Amino acid sequence: MPDSGPPILRQIRAALAPRHRIAAAATVAAAAGIGMFVLLLAIGDAGDGIGGRAAVLVYSAAVTAIAAAIGLLWLVVDLRLLRAAAALAAETRFVAETRSDGVVARPSYPALAPLPEAIAELAEKLIAAHRETDRAVSAATARLEEQKSRLETILRDLSEGVMVCNLDHQVLLYNHVALALLHVTGDLGLGRSLFNLVTREPVLHALERLTRGAAPMAEAAASESAVPLVCATVDARTLLSGRMSLVRDADRRPGGYVLTFADVTRELAELGRRDALLRDATEGLRQPLANLRAAAETAAAYPDLDPARRRAFDEVVLRESSVLSERLETLDRDYRSMGGSHWPMAEVHSVDLFGCIVRRLAETGGPTTTMVGIPLWLHGDSHALALALERILRNLAKATGAPGLDIEALLGDRRVYVQISWSGEPLAAGAIEAWLDEPLPGAPGAIVLRDVFAHHGSELWSRSGSAPGRAILRIPLPAPARVQFAPGPDADLPSRPEFYDFDLLHLTARPEPQGKLALRALTYVVFDTETTGLRPSDGDEIIAIGAVRIVNGRILTGETFSRLVNPGRPIPSQSIRFHGITDAMVADAPPLSVVLPQFKAFVADAVLVAHNAAFDLKFLKLKEAESGVVFDNVPLDTLLISAFLFGEFADHSLDAVARRLGIEISGRHSAAGDAMGTAAIFLRLLDLFEQRGLRTLDDLLGASRMTLEIRTRQMQF
């Protein structure tokens, strides 16, 4: 029959049943043993007579009685003490393990007194402690819920967007204003990457300023609790101005950051109205001043007045006109000196600024504008600059009739230049001067182009470009406080080992017309990869691909490819030291089988360019079957081109070639940064290559093939 009853009874039965069986068996065994011993003695002494047998029987009965008494005593001890102790232990364990509100019944175990009373008292205190803990947890939970509700109310009522992220740039908290500013419909999704919403570079730069910084930024950042930043949404629809501050743990170590941001249009509205008021004041004084001077001159022209009266009149007119003139000059000087100080100046990345302008022109039927060159940082009022540059591009297209315009950022001595170039003649200074007083459509207040450039201490000029038939318009802007190409903390990291493979670098002459085309007429895609390690055939995988397109000898800054890749395996710490990409950063990234078809679509039939190209191509070739794409494009290696041009140098690593050519690489050891730097190196090498009279793709392939054979043989000795 199966055991039944409450759990506590089943536990007691289970505890007592083995002991009861052992006690009963021991008692029966003892009695049987003694009886058998006595019986054997009786049989052995049967010949001694009736009296002897009687004595033996009496002795046997006595011994059996003693054994029975011992067995009975054991049963009494078992029933009264051992079973009670086992039951008490089981009940006590039940109370301790189940957090039961029941207490141990003191009268149940009188034979064990005062132990049950002590255990019951202890159980009651334990239960009371449990109840107190539960009350404290409930109260703390209620307080947390109340604080959470208050925080949600505060965040909901803020006019600025707020986002909290960890150091892997995953979103931990946000408010609804942030959703509206970032054009997110529905929920954002906690744990998702911030860089799915805003551009990467400004955020990374601001975080660098707060965490480590580069001289001279480090000292300034150390005293700052927050730093300003300007970034764009990933769809280039909105420029955001905000601030970043760190979230620190109890040991003052950074564990994340808070971003607060807003659309800059509202902030500029009041400033625009102030400028309009000041401009009206200056322009309104000029005409009365001119009239006063004219009156003085007229009075001086009439000799009929009494000399004394004439002299007094002249003195008053001249004195007042001088005072008005001085006031006008002072007002104008003060206005210009304060013009830029109260405007929201921040460091802005040229790709963010130009990208918004190009997109707006494309949406509104403006001139075709192409971003070219290496991205740079500049310092300014991003919203006003965007409006001003858009207006200038429209005016240029109308004035020159150029079918397309290029815009890029150039690094000057102490300035950053925005340069616009086109095919045609330079503009006359008078035409540019006429633009400066035109109001900006859509600008807050009534500011004009002249106001924007006055705020930035800038001016415009046009001249012939360095290329034949090209003209440029340049706008100098303030340089940022940050170092444009600051070396990272691991700037001394070694370069990748040189990697050669004739099968991968199929550097053979191409059939016409491609092989005979001029190098400047070809389309190139310069790319770079970041990987888990340096052994593609031993299981290392790609974790990032970056690329940029070159057309007609121009780096198209707006035509880039940048993807993180989930390698399907942990990223070794020694590799993270190089590229800074962690497992958390690629956790939500697609696998290479998804990214490679996207990259192939971006490349199309362009010539592929990389530094130490065989290394990157090996990773691509190993995944062609899995991804279903084949990279049969013509490959070029800037390492081989450098070795051909500078055979007297032994070091042809990316860093060495960049230093040799005077090119700075922003974002070194990142796929996108290295690809952009390699593109600048490639164009500079093409200039030197063409100076030697070698101008076609076949010429370049032949030189690369010869250099590859020489360096491969050198490595064998």
Image: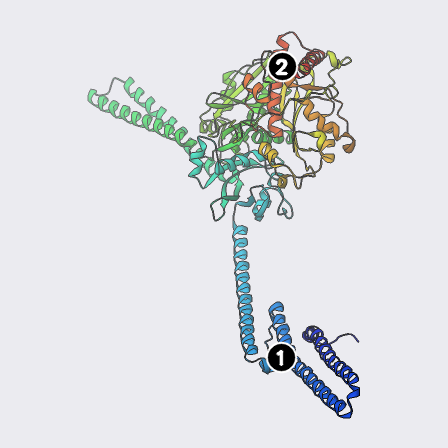
Q: Looking at the picture, which amino acid does disc 2 mark?
A: Ala
Q: Is residue 421 left or right of residue 430?
A: right
CA neighbours of label 1 inside 10 A, class few (<14), some (14 to 19), many (20+): some
Residue projecting furthest to the top: 693
Q: Position of residue 688 (x, y in %)?
A: 61, 11
Q: Position of residue 168 (x, y in %)?
A: 58, 41
Q: Looking at the picture, which amino acid does disc 1 mark?
A: Leu
Q: Secondary structure at mark 2?
A: helix
In the rendered image, which quarter contains the C terminus?
top right
Can residue 193 be seen in this snapshot?
A: yes
- Mark 2–mark 1 distance (CA, rounded to whole Å): 96 Å
Residue 599 vs residue 27, the one in the foreground: 27
Residue at x-position 47% and y-position 20%: 413
Dot placed on the residue nearer the N-terminal end, 2 or 1: 1
Can residue 367 be seen in this snapshot?
A: no
Q: Position of residue 86 (x, y in %)?
A: 64, 75
- Total marks in image: 2
| Quarter where residue 649 is shown | top right
Contact (Cβ within 8 Å) of mark 2 with mark 1: no
Residue 381 vs residue 678, the one in the foreground: 678
Question: Disc 2 designates what residue?
Answer: 643
Residue 220 vs residue 25, the one in the foreground: 25
Above or below — where is 397 with respect to 204? above
Q: Is residue 58 left or right of residue 409?
A: right
Q: Secondary structure at mark 1?
A: helix
Which label is found at residue 81? 1
